[in-house]
Image: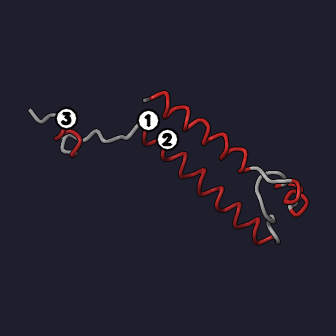
Amino acid sequence: MKIKVFIATTISMCFFIISAFGCPACEKQQPKLFQGLTHGGGPDGFTDYIIIGITVLIVIITLFFSIKWLINPGEKRQNHIKQFILNID
């Protein structure tokens, strides 16, 4: 059962990865920086690049803090709810 799920997931991911890249017709419509990355037209003006930059910055900050707080959550107080659950005796 697990091997069938693994194979189905692998095949699905391969199709997703292949379809994520742009086709030759779409590459001609996009600026040099984004050619081959996505389908459709790329950013039209300077404001689109600002929006993309802000979005990338938000994603990077979110990823940083997610990893940081997963590795070291920092709840060390004795009255924190985590301590209550761990010391249920």
What is the three-letter code of the residue carrying label 2? Ile
For marks 2 and 3 on the same chain, the one whose residue lies earlier in the sequence: 2
Secondary structure of the residue carrying numbered label 2: helix
Binning the other alpha carbons within 10 Å of mark 2 as few (below 14), some (14 to 19) or many (20 upward) gives: few
Binning the other alpha carbons within 10 Å of mark 1 as few (below 14), some (14 to 19) or many (20 upward) gives: few
Secondary structure of the residue carrying numbered label 3: helix
Please state the horizontal and vertical placement of residue 5, each as a whole percent of the image. Answer: 48, 34
Q: On residue 71, which mark appears?
A: 1
Q: Are marks 1 and 2 in contact (CB under 8 Å)?
A: yes
Quadrant where the C terminus sits is top left
Left or right placement of residue 38 versus residue 24 in this view: left
Disc 3 target residue: 86
Please state the horizontal and vertical placement of residue 23, each as a whole percent of the image. Answer: 83, 53
Left or right placement of residue 70 versus residue 56 in this view: left
Total numbered circles: 3
For marks 3 and 1 on the same chain, the one whose residue lies earlier in the sequence: 1
What is the three-letter code of the residue carrying label 3? Leu
The residues tagged by marks 1 and 2 sit, at their Cα atoms, a distance apart of 6 Å
Left or right placement of residue 47 versus residue 12 in this view: right
Question: Looking at the image, which residue is at 62% across and 37% down?
Answer: 11
Secondary structure of the residue carrying numbered label 1: helix
Using the image, determine if residue 12 lies above or below residue 41: above
Q: On residue 67, which mark appears?
A: 2
In front of the other: 85 or 5: 5
What is the three-letter code of the residue carrying label 1? Ile
Q: Are marks 3 and 1 in contact (CB under 8 Å)?
A: no
